[in-house]
Image (spheres, coloured by chain):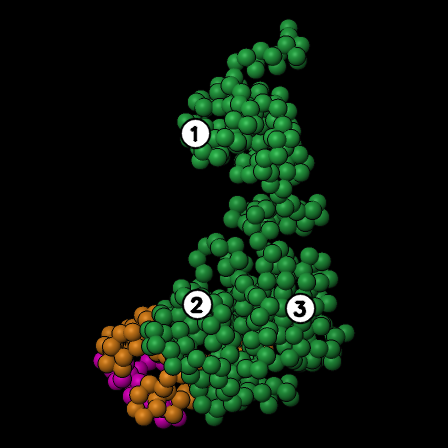
Amino acid sequence: MAAVRIPPTLRAEVGGLRELEAGGDTVAAVLDDLVERYPSLGEQLLADGELASYVNVYLGGEDIRTLDGLETPVHDGETLILLPAMAGGV
Amino acid sequence: MASYRELLARVKGEIEEISSIDAQALIEAREAPLFVDVREPDEWEEGHIPGAIYVTRGRLESRIEGLVPDKSRPLVVYCASGSRSAFAAKALAEMGYEDVSSLAGGFVDWKRNGFDITIPRVLSPEQRSRYSRHLLIPEVGEEGQQRLLDARVLLVGAGGLGSPASLYLAAAGVGTLGIVDADVVDESNLQRQIVHSTDRLGEPKVLSAKRTLEALNPDVRVVPFEERLTSENVERILADGWDVIVDGADNFPTRYLVNDASVWHGIPVVHGSIFRFEGQVTVFAPGAGPCYRCLFPQPPPAELAPSCAEGGVLGVLPGIIGSIQANETLKLILDRGDTLAGRLLLFDALGTTLDEVNVRRDPYCPVCGDSPTITEYVDYVEFCNVPLAVE
């Protein structure tokens, strides 16, 4: 199982949780597990089955797009950070 | 017992002297010695030989080894007329400096010959007192403080992030602060926008901020831009020449405008954003790191972007993120330390945790990449504007 950090902009989709556990050997599998449990998260994260361009996913501090994308392997105990763009400054 | 005259004559017999004309000839032959000015502070401030190092006669012995570790380096010591420097040259020779001369006739003779002098820019006594805690830090010092006073920083937004950032930059003595904001002060701003106050309700934020900041520090000139940054005015506002942009905007269209303009003008951006209990902060340094579009190539579609008014924010959060933005800005001006370029800090006020992720320049970035596809300003839909107007 991997830990997934949920950003404040997406917490409404997961019942207000800041972090949750999800299973899978790759980033795609972990996200599939999440979306299966929280379908509305899918609309926020994915576009045409790909990661939306305004959402970043980090594994070990690195953007998965600089690794193997959705096929990047995920090991037990690792932490994924979901990071959609946010604009607020007021 | 020897009188002063006898002592001076004896010392001058024990040291080397060099005339102004011979010293100037060394400079012209590109064999310039290191000039050591041993006069009093007020004499130094009225002018000195270019490139000279300064240490008063009274502190010469205790300081010189720190300033000039290489004892074989040729030195020419000077004072006003060549007397104090004669004693100084003797002391340096006794400390093992191998090639020391005293400038015969001193600075007075140097000036009489019409050779180059430098008149240092100095802080006033009031500035010396105001910035004393900066002057004590080697990384800032008098030179750094002058850089801050000469610096021009443009703040986009005089709200939650712009408030603490502008207050600390003004307090630090950043000489010119441009502020872009079209809003007026509203009661609901005062829970976090600490540059404003209750007696400013209804006043344009840029003018309220100008009053606060110029009252805090009379060295600071605030240039107000009472308008919203758009593709129409961004070139005019940036034409004023800014060293750093502090992005505390409240919407995506402005953030992409700021980014694209900063890349095209080569101005570093200190970026901060906040939402509820969480903040993000980083530095985008054109040419030296990623830009905002490397991080997020496009804004999210309007229907998925979080509404600003619904979002809410803990009042102290912009204080923390905006202060980090001020910190990064000061380091960029001073050219000291390591900035957040290439690193995005994620601060969670609820858990009090700080995470860091790497942000890399994307060679396919539409603006700063190797083959840019965006070459003029894009006006995105202002999906966060309506709720804000209510705020």
Q: Which of the chains bears the disc numbered 1? A: B
User: Mark 3 packing: few (<14 Cα in 10 Å), some, or many (20+)?
Assistant: some
User: Mark 1 packing: few (<14 Cα in 10 Å), some, or many (20+)?
Assistant: some
Front position in the image: A41 or B8: B8
Residue named by callout 3: B223
Q: Amino acid at mark 3?
A: Val
Q: Measure the C-alpha gap from mark 1 to mark 3.
A: 48 Å
Which type of secondary structure does the marked residue at label 2 adopt? loop
Q: Amino acid at mark 1?
A: Arg
Magenta portion: prevailing SS class: helix
Residue B109 picture location, percent across and down = 63, 27
Residue in the image at 50% along x and 87% along y: B380
Q: Measure the C-alpha gap from mark 2 to mark 1.
A: 41 Å
Residue named by callout 1: B73
Looking at this view, name the residue that lies furthest to the top.
B1
Which label number is shown at residue B286?
2
Looking at this view, name the residue that lies furthest to the right.
B199
Please provide the residue range marked out in magenta: A19-42
Residue B55 picture location, percent across and down = 57, 33
Q: Colour of chain B?
A: green
User: Mark 2 packing: few (<14 Cα in 10 Å), some, or many (20+)?
Assistant: many
Which type of secondary structure does the marked residue at label 1 adopt? loop
* Relative to B287, residue B187 above or below: below
Q: Which of the chains bears the disc numbered 3? A: B
* Relative to B184, residue B126 above or below: above
> Do marks 1 and 3 share a subunit?
yes
First in sequence: mark 2 vs mark 3:
3
Front position in the image: B52 or B321: B52
Q: Measure the C-alpha gap from mark 2 to mark 3.
A: 24 Å
Is residue B1 a member of the stretch shown in magenta?
A: no
